[in-house]
């Protein structure tokens, strides 16, 4: 009886959600996946195989995983950027999820220019509405509100829509993976050699690729980053002199745009830093993968409370598990017979790279939070 009640209640909730106005629907089609080609790749003689039991062979499991990843990557390659996506990726990257009308308009136009001048793929489309029409639609659908002020109106995310706006933002984060990374690398550093920025992009790419379902190889991502640097210079967001890339002075309009752009994918890199920081603080052969996941989850959860990210996926345990799996795949870490994680000096490369990307405030907060948590975990083991 309770199950029946829950089902009926769920139907009413679903009906209420479906009745809500979400605006106009746009459908894009991705490149089709040819299953025969995928089967040939994993098991060239698959047509002649006779399954003698219900147990799935290892190659079949790998095929299913690869097929799932390919589906997600192709969906991302055919994204449509709608007005609410643009509002979400911009406003959720600002303090208090709010911005002046002028600043919000300029940031949205910057994103449109990035998507147009350097498309993620030929199948990605972007709304043609003007910024004024985007604001009107956001207000009409109940995602944002305008706060009047004598010095200029402010647009902010409605408090009850924060989590839903996170969903809209996450749907297009992959489109800004390169530009946001570049912005992040220069927000806390006035200038950096172009070569160093691109090297860091290559180092972290395998770990963000799986989370954001990016379609590039590492080499392609670095090349896309090189092109992105040129576009950001063309749009006067960055400056360059010879081999050095430089941001505009803090307090300038360009520096403000760069900071908001950096914040778009910041949480993805912060999660990565948490994993590396926990491992570095614990030391090699001191912690198992499940313990590492738990510590990372707790640290991220506390940061979420301290800084009000209002983003449940920031401390999603499955994302940390994915990072750890990728570190194993990239041979940065391995496990001993007792399941303890072993790492070499290579981990320092990731740690130093991650430190360059994040603000001192976040770095220090992560490291300060780790000390008591690590002590508690060790007490539990004893």
Image (cartoon, helix red, strand yellow):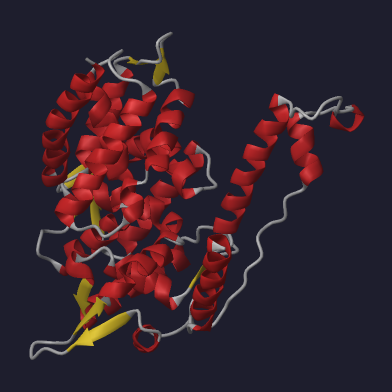
Observer-nearest of 322 and 35? 322
Of all residues, the one furthest to the top in this rendering is 337
Whether residue 55 is situated above or below residue 322 in the rendered picture: above
Residue 280, quarter of picture? top left
In depth, the one of 53 and 152 nearer the eye is 53
> Camera-side residue: 1 or 109?
1
Q: Answer left or right for 374 relative to 201.
A: left
Q: Residue furthest front?
A: 1
Does any portion of residue 125 appear in the rendered image?
A: no
Total numbered labels: 0
Which quarter of the rendered picture does the C terminus lie within? top left
Residue at image location 89% in from the left, 33% down from the top: 47
- Give percent across and percent down for residue 211: 45, 45
In the image, residue 260 lies at what x, y percent? Answer: 24, 62
Is residue 373 found left or right of 213 in the rendered image?
A: left
**Which of the 4 quarters of the picture holds residue 311?**
bottom left
**Residue at x 37% of width, y 33% of height:** 203
Q: Nearer the viewer, residue 110 or 208?
A: 208
Q: Position of residue 8 (x, y in %)?
A: 56, 71
Which residue appears at 13% of the width and 87% of the height? Answer: 152
Is 225 above or below relative to 309? above
The image quadrant of residue 342 is top left
The residue lying at 19 percent from left, 47 percent from top is: 303
Q: Is residue 52 visible?
A: yes
């Amino acid at each position: 009886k309770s199950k029946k009640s829950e089902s009926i209640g769920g139907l009413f909730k679903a009906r209420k959600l479906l009745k809500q106005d979400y605006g106009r629907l746009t459908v894009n089609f991705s490149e089709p996946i040819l299953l025969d080609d995928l089967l040939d790749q994993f098991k060239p003689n698959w047509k002649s195989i006779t399954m003698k039991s219900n147990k799935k062979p290892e190659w079949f499991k790998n095929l299913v995983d690869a097929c799932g990843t390919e589906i997600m990557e192709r969906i991302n390659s055919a994204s449509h950027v709608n007005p609410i996506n643009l509002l979400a990726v911009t406003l959720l990257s600002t303090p208090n999820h709010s911005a002046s009308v002028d600043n919000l308009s300029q940031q949205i136009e910057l994103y449109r220019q990035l998507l147009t001048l350097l498309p993620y793929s030929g199948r990605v489309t972007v709304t043609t509405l003007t910024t004024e029409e985007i604001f009107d639609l956001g207000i009409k659908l109940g995602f944002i509100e305008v706060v009047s002020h004598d010095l200029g109106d402010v647009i902010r995310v409605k408090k009850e829509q924060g989590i839903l706006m996170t969903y809209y933002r996450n749907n297009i984060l992959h489109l800004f993976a390169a530009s946001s990374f570049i912005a992040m690398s220069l927000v806390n550093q006035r200038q950096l050699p172009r070569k160093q920025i691109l090297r860091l992009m290559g180092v972290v790419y395998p770990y963000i690729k799986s989370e954001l379902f990016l379609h590039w190889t590492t080499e392609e991502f670095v090349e896309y980053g090189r092109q992105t640097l040129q576009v950001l210079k063309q749009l006067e967001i960055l400056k360059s002199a010879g081999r050095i890339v430089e941001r505009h002075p803090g307090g300038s309009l360009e520096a403000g745009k760069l900071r908001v752009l950096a914040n778009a994918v910041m949480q993805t890199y912060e999660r990565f830093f948490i994993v590396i920081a926990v491992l570095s603080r614990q030391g090699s052969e001191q912690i198992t993968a499940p313990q590492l996941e738990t510590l990372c989850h707790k640290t991220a959860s506390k940061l979420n409370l301290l800084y009000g990210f209002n983003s449940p996926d920031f401390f999603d345990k499955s994302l940390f598990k994915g990072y750890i799996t990728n570190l194993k795949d990239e041979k940065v870490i391995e496990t001993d017979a007792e399941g303890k994680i072993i790492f070499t000096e290579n981990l320092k490369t990731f740690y130093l790279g991650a430190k360059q990307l994040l603000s001192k405030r976040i770095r220090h907060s992560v490291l300060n939070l780790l000390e008591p948590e690590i002590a508690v975990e060790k007490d539990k083991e004893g």
